[in-house]
Amino acid sequence: MASVLIADSSAPLRRAAQFLFESLGFEVAGARDGAEALSLVEGLSPDLIIVDARLPGFEGAALVGAIRDLPEGRNACIFFVTENSGPAAVRAALEAGADDYLIKPFDRELLSFKLAQAKARGHLAARPRATRLVQDNSSSWRFRTFGKAV
C-alpha cells in the first residue's frame, strides 16, 4: 500500500484529505507544521507528500527543498498545494523540486487525475515496505508498515 504525508496547518483539511486518500487506497499520516513534516518524512519515508504553501515554520517552496535534501525525500512524489499564493509560489515550489501542484479545494476526481499523471511520469511508484512492531503509547503492540526498515 502506498503512503502519503499531508502537511497542512488546517486540521479539517487534513481530515478531508485523509478521507480522500484512504478512499484511494493510501496509508495516511498528517503534519501540522514544517518541522513535524520533516520529522515524519525521515521516520516514515512516504511515497507521496502533500505540502501546503502556507505551512507554519516554513514557506512552501523552502519546505519542498528541505524535503528533497533528505535521503528519504529524494524519491518521494511531492504535490504543492496552494489556495491564493499565485503563479510565483507555484513556480518556486516546482523549481525547488515539487512534482506537481494542486489548487484548493480539490476533489477526488482531480486528485485521481493528478495521481495517474504522476504514475505515468514515473514520479509515484509504491516502494517495498518493511514491517516492524511498534507500541502506540498504550499497553498493546501492533504491526505497522513503514517505508524503511528501522
Image (tube, rainbow, N blue to C red):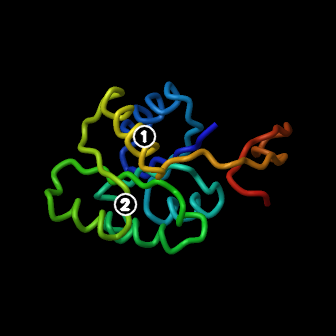
Mark sitting on residue 14: 1
Q: Residue at x 47, y 34 (%)?
A: 18
Q: Nearer the viewer, residue 114 or 39?
A: 114
* Amino acid type of the residue that numbered disc 2 sits on in the rendered structure: Ala
Q: Residue 112's quadrant in the figure?
A: top left
Task: Measure the alpha-carbon separation of dots 1 and 2.
Answer: 19 Å
Vertical side of 142 occupied by 9: above or below = below
Mark sitting on residue 144: none
Q: Residue at x 33, y 54 (%)?
A: 80
Q: Quick check: 51 left or right of 93?
A: right
Q: Quadrant of the N terminus?
A: top right
* Amino acid type of the residue that numbered disc 1 sits on in the rendered structure: Arg
Q: Residues within 10 Å of mark 2 (few under 14, many from 20)?
A: many
Q: Residue 40's quadrant in the figure?
A: bottom right
- Residue 44 percent across, percent down from the top left: 64, 54
Q: Residues within 10 Å of mark 1 (few under 14, many from 20)?
A: many
